[in-house]
């Protein structure tokens, strides 16, 4: 049985979507873990879902990084456990230092809610190995601070170490450096992405491409 912890902050709004997707997978069980908990022992993978943790006051993810559960997330990451941060979860992973770079306001300073097409850049990670090389994925974005920024030196490190997971294929909706939509840490056990695969994992919703990401995690 693959056990997933879905972290819930005040303001999380995609936790139930992630819970539904994981529990639809064979031999998988997802549990909600409130942000004030202090242990993630016994879980195989961790999902930090999208939403507006603490209302996105100060800066998206800036307050959530101080929640008690974050210490355990950092500890479990060092053990090699798989962690995926989606949208606000990506912002939180950057704020706590588990992923490099920064997420700024979208280039047009407006909240974006639309479907986008992604191009997978790394098909060998535990999050993407079920996706074919050069395959296009369609899924929604819903954010105001999704403009990924990193220095030129930092970008070169990402490229040299194959840490770019996804890029926007056509338009660059938020102005991200090099059209980056998702990245991996150096050890490839942590991934952050702005698009929402959990909202594109059910044929009833008309989108199913996100399911491949969760299948990759389980079947790694």
Image (spheres, helix red, strand yellow):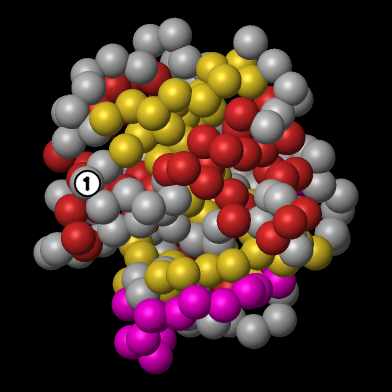
Q: Quadrant of residue 24?
A: top right
Residue beneath the point at 71% across and 71% down:
117
Residue linked to disc 1? 10
Instruction: Identify which residue is drawn at 49% across, 77% down.
Output: 113
Using the image as rendered, state which of residue 76 and residue 99 is in the foreground: 76
Residue 179 appears at what percent x and percent y?
A: 58, 73
Is residue 176 inside the magenta stretch? Answer: no
Magenta span contains residue 112: yes
Q: Nearer the viewer, residue 131 or 18?
A: 18
Q: Quadrant of residue 213?
A: top right
Query: Within the image, what quadrant is residue 205 found in?
Result: bottom right
The answer to whether 103 is drawn above or below residue 20 in the figure is: below
Of the 4 image quadrants, the one containing the C terminus is top right
Residue 11 % position (x, y) = 26, 52
Quick one: 19 or 69, which is closer to the camera? 19
The residue positioned 43% from the left and 43% from the top of the image is 15
Residues rendered magenta in the picture? 105-125
Q: Is residue 86 visible?
A: yes
Q: Is residue 215 above or below residue 197?
A: above
């Amino acid at each position: 049985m693959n056990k997933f912890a879905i972290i819930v902050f005040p303001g999380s709004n995609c936790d139930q979507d992630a819970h539904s997707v994981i529990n639809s997978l064979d031999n998988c069980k997802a549990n909600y873990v409130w942000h004030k908990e202090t242990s993630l022992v016994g879980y195989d993978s961790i999902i930090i879902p999208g939403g507006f943790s603490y209302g996105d006051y100060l800066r998206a993810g800036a307050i959530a990084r101080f929640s008690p559960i974050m210490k355990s997330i950092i500890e479990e990451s060092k053990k090699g456990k798989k962690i995926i941060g989606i949208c606000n979860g990506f912002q939180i992973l950057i704020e706590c230092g588990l992923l490099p770079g920064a997420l700024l306001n979208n280039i047009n300073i407006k909240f974006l809610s639309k479907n986008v097409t992604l191009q997978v850049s790394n098909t060998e990670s535990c999050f993407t190995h079920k996706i074919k090389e050069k395959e296009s994925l369609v899924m929604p974005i819903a954010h105001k601070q999704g403009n990924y920024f990193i220095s030129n030196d930092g970008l070169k490190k990402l490229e040299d170490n194959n840490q770019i997971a996804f890029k926007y294929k056509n338009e660059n909706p938020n102005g991200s450096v090099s059209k980056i939509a998702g990245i991996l840490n150096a050890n490839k056990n942590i991934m952050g992405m702005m698009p929402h695969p959990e909202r594109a994992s059910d044929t009833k919703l008309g989108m199913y491409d996100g399911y491949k990401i969760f299948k990759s995690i389980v079947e790694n």
